Image (cartoon, helix red, strand yellow):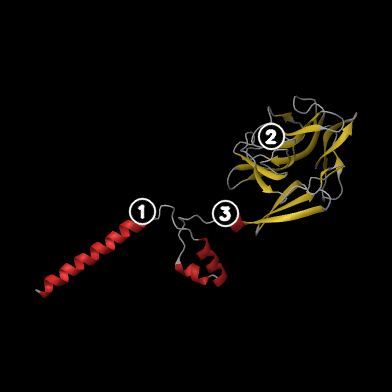
Amino acid sequence: MYYQTFENGQGVFKSALSSDGLNWEPEPGTRLTGGGEFDPDNVVHPSVIALPQGGYRMYYDGEIKKTDQEFIWRILSATSPDGLSWTKDEGVRIDVEEEPLEADLVFNSHAKYNELTGTYELYFGVQTPNDDFIDGIYLATSTDGLIFSDPIAQLTPEKESGEFGPEGQTGSYQDPFVLEFPEGKRMYYWVQGSGIHSALLTREASTPRTETEPQSILETVKQKPAEIWKKIKEFKLPDNLELYIIPTVLLVIGTAVVIYLWRARLKR
């Protein structure tokens, strides 16, 4: 277990071990402290994954204080060969001042490594004044665990409440934690003012069938009528339909003319 505690008024990361997941024994020493370019005032919210090549990577929030009530959180990272000695990676994983987010805070990421695709996934909370984005939970992906794609919204309220309390905007979605189930990914998340909720992304929704993927008639017939009707409604005609209609009409007319002339010749 990796967790935050305070020493000399500043947050630090510690670790603990357990044989049953209930009783924990703190390990000696400190895993990570602030004091860097992007985390001079605090380190918050550690999330650790095992790397495919061996060792570990920790994603965490680095804090820069503006005032006693205002601060910036960015998502940073550090690596370790043994889970005990950690070295901070250079740069920033998810920044607050870069487009498209231009956020006040990006924070509390849940890191996952997808073995099937070889992709690193970061689910994290966003607090942004950007009118094009709403506060909520976003996802960014990476092939190397260091350079991430532009964030994509995963779960956001229909509208922002505009009401703020001591722990942020009321109704905002934060603190994602994603688990894999046979039916798909389930995200547990905290809603400011109403506790912990969950949402499910089914495997069917996460891996949609492509338009070119074959599907036998037998497979279609075996489906329930409602599912067949759904697929019929989802069928889309090509945008350049006229390119198909005109040659087809000409072909039908031409075939009819040939048949007519051939029959007329036989009657002679």
Q: Residues within 10 Å of mark 1 (few under 14, many from 20)?
A: few
- Judging depth in this view, the residue of 251 and 44 nearest the camera is 251
Dot 1 or dot 3: first in sequence order is 3
Q: Residues within 10 Å of mark 3 (few under 14, many from 20)?
A: few
The N terminus - image quarter: top right
Q: Which residue is mark 2?
A: 102
Dot 2 or dot 1: first in sequence order is 2
Residue 88, placed above or below residue 232: above
Question: Where residue 256 sits: x, y (%)?
Answer: 23, 67
Left or right? Give the position of 210 relative to 250: right
Q: Which residue is mark 3?
A: 207
Left or right? Give the position of 163 relative to 88: right
Which residue: 57% across, 70% down? 226
Q: Which residue is mark 1?
A: 243
What amino acid type is highlighted by mark number 1?
Answer: Leu
What amino acid type is highlighted by mark number 2?
Answer: Glu
Which residue: 12% across, 73% down? 266
Q: CA distance from mark 3 to mark 2?
A: 30 Å
Question: Where residue 32 sits: x, y (%)?
Answer: 79, 31
- Secondary structure at numbered mark 2: loop
- Secondary structure at numbered mark 1: helix
What amino acid type is highlighted by mark number 3?
Answer: Thr
